[in-house]
Amino acid sequence: MRSGPWLEIVLDKPELLVRGSFDEAAPVMLSGKLVVHLQETIRVRSLKLTFNGRVDTFVSQSAGGNSAKDEHREIVSHEWVFLAPQKPPVMWGPENRSFDFDLLFQGDNPETVVTALGKIRYQLQATLERTSFHGNLVATTDVPVKRGPMPGAPWALALMESIEAAGDWNQQLDYRVSVPTRSLKDSELFHTRFELEPRTKGLKLISVGVLIKEYARYYSTSGEPLHRFARVVARNENYISPLGTCSTAPRKSDECMDLVDATSVQIPMAIPKAYSGIQYDILTDVIEIRHRIKFLIKVRDSSMLVHSIFIAVPVSIMPVTARDDTNILPRYETALLNPGTIIMRSNTLPPTYDAAISSSQPSLSESSGNTAVVPRPEVNQCAEVDGFPCPLHRNRSQFYLASPDNSPPLQPISTPDIPSSTSLPSEPNSTTAPTISVDTLADNSRRSSACSSSKHPSSLHDLLSNNKLSDKVRSIFH
């Protein structure tokens, strides 16, 4: 227990949550009480409480720039005087005294941000002035100001869509990466799912990983860009053992899992705590904060070369999301899954679309109604995609940056006649996240599910020996 007199600021709410953008947010109430703890009688001259908000940038410290471009200004200021200056001083104690306060905080004020080169902070400071030869009593507390979407805002509901990025690497591996939502909260645990399907022999799955990168930009009051800064705020890379278990301990490529079947891996990621570990997405006149989530797939090919595939997707870090207003659960439940485990590794999957059709109609590939496939545009590995340079070279590993798959789904120009013994139900409409089109892996998966009534081939060797594969599929395995 503290001895002597002291001050305490008690807020009704530990933070201020503003809902909506700057031009639509309504004011919120800042309220609480100031408590003067007294164990003895003291002489008091005055008592006041101030609320201040400031913007301070220190861009000149980053590269020895011009300090004149640094920003230092006051956003908001308010003062409560609970005891005006007294002569002579008044006697208080030994009982405690409490003083209520409240203030209507405007919604167009910027939210709190704390970075190495810039800060926007709001603070309450109480000062009790005593007589001579006695030190004044001072208490301070920060008031975090956070901004969330307006309930039911269309852009906030759009952020509830899942992240789905898919493509193929060098015609050797089909991959699909998904996260349940595009908006994440600080201190939240989410899971990332990797679905991998090899298209050639000799691949080894070394590891899969997720990282979140934060990008900060600083501007002058006139809008001139002054500095950019990026850092990794969270990462998790899991190495896959030959038995299919995940671990964060690094492994040699020879000690990793053979990628021979369609495999799905799910790993967790914990968002750091706000301000100390990560900043919220913010856009003010002097500071801008944005985030990207990067997925990593590291494999070794049959030539003993290690390759790393990177996929970068924008993501929003927010204090409150539309899920909190609607109580809508993610598209798949992740709480029942153990972190960092192989949740599916099966060699009894339905056959691919071409294999299923070929097994039911061997002469289909020779008929006049051949299926034409729209070619997928290749990713330019020497180009810069969304500001991320590519390729990167580290420790003899080739890094690839895969852009979202914008190619159209595979659609046959003409549908061949199928025997009456095989019925193909209509394919359900597929929906994907904005800017991410239907991918080859998901298309093949849905087609194979639709053809589950077809006769499954016993093994790849039987298909090759009995001429039941089309020339296209045969070329993949030779």
Image (cartoon, rainbow, N blue to C red):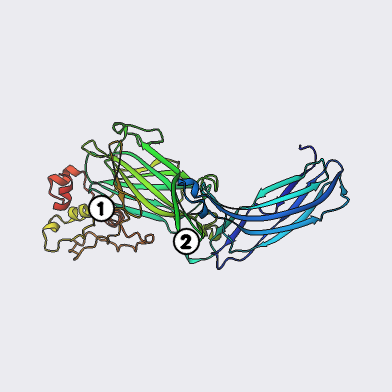
Q: Secondary structure at mark 2?
A: loop
* Residue 336 visible in rendering: no
Q: Report x, y in % for residue 42.
A: 85, 44
Of 34 and 365, nearer the camera is: 34
Pick whichever, 314 or 193, lies toward us: 314
Looking at the image, can residue 114 be seen? yes
Query: What's under tag 1, amino acid-wise?
Result: Asn
Instruction: Check disc 2 and report the residue beneath it.
Output: 223
Which of the two labelled residues, at mark 1 and mark 2, occupies the earlier sequence position? 2
Label placed on residue 412: none
Residue type, mark 2 in image? Gly
State the mark number for residue 380. Answer: 1
Figure quadrant of residue 103: bottom right
Residue drawn at point x = 26 percent, y = 56 percent = 451
Q: Nearer the viewer, mark 1 or mark 2?
A: 2
Place of residue 215 in the rendered image (x, y in percent of width and height, measured from the top left): 44, 51
Question: In the rendered view, does 420 fall on the left or right side of 49?
Answer: left
- Residue 472: where, in percent of width, then height? 16, 52
Q: Nearer the viewer, residue 158 or 7?
A: 7
- Report whether 166 appears left or right of 78: left
